[in-house]
Each structure stands twice: as structure tokens, then as C-alpha cells.
């Protein structure tokens, strides 16, 4: 009986951790993009290898953002990114294609 209790608690904990992530994805899929604005930025650092390299970028107004990309970019270079706003107000940045 005690062995099953640990398994049940582990299952509930994993399920509880996955639900908010799924809800966020469903909200993003259901909310269309309202606007896409070009922004210039400078790459300050990058971490990771292969796919999903996380870059720290400094925007033209001095603020910083984290952007993921699967392509390598040179540290210190100027790049064009996009500021994407969804209908419900969520804003994220991505590299311009």
C-alpha cells in the first residue's frame, strides 16, 4: 500500500506541473497575432548548442530580452528581430526570417 502512495503522489505532481503549460499553449494557439513590429538589437551572449540556443539581446531602447533560435549568431552583431503581440496582449520576440 505504501509503494502505491508514492506513485500516486508522483503522478499527481507531474500532472499538476503539466496542466499550466498546456493551458498556456492552448491560449497561444487560440489567440491570433495582432501585430509584428521590426526591432533592431545587438547580441550580447548566447548559451546552448545545436537547436534552441538562447540569446541575450539588447534592444535599441536599452532593454534586454531572451530569444531562442536554432541558428548560430555572432556575439556583438546587430540583428533584426520582431516584436510580436497577440490579441490578448502577450508580447514576445523572435528572430526575423
Image (spheres, rainbow, N blue to C red):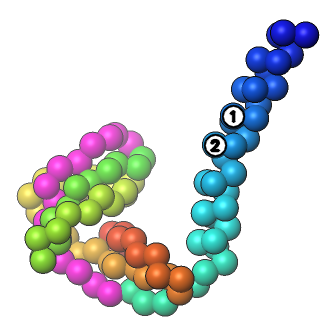
Q: How many marks?
A: 2
Label 2: few (<14), some (14–19) or many (≥20) C-alpha neighbours in 10 Å: few
Q: Quadrant of residue 42?
A: bottom left
Q: Quadrant of residue 28?
A: bottom right
x, y (%) of residue 94? 36, 69
- Taking 53 as reference, is 57 left or right? left
Can you identify the residue that label 1 sits on? 13
- Residue that appears at 63% across and 71% down: 27
- Which is the main secondary structure of the residues drawn in magenta? strand
- For the record, the magenta segment spans 37-50
Task: In the rendered structure, find residue 17 and report the number of the disc placed on it.
Answer: 2
Query: Can you say which quadrant of the picture contains the N terminus?
Result: top right
- Residue that appears at 69% across and 36% down: 14
- Residue that appears at 32% across and 87% down: 37
Numbered disc 1: secondary structure: helix
- Taking 39 as reference, is 90 left or right? right
Label 1: few (<14), some (14–19) or many (≥20) C-alpha neighbours in 10 Å: few
Q: Are marks 1 and 2 in contact (CB under 8 Å)?
A: yes
Residue 97 appears in view: no
Q: In this rendered view, identify the residue nearer to me: 64 or 41.
A: 64
Residue 87 appears in view: yes
x, y (%) of residue 21? 61, 54
- Taking 60 as reference, is 73 left or right? right
Up the image or down, 32 lies above or below 73; here it is below
Amino acid at each position: 500500500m505504501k509503494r502505491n502512495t508514492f506513485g500516486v503522489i508522483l503522478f499527481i505532481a507531474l500532472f499538476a506541473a503539466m496542466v499550466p503549460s498546456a493551458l498556456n499553449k492552448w491560449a497561444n494557439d487560440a489567440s491570433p497575432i495582432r501585430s509584428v513590429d521590426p526591432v533592431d538589437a545587438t547580441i550580447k551572449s548566447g548559451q546552448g548548442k545545436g537547436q534552441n540556443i538562447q540569446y541575450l539581446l539588447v534592444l535599441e531602447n536599452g532593454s534586454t530580452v531572451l530569444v531562442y533560435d536554432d541558428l548560430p549568431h555572432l556575439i556583438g552583431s546587430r540583428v533584426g528581430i520582431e516584436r510580436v503581440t497577440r490579441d490578448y496582449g502577450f508580447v514576445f520576440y523572435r528572430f526575423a526570417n
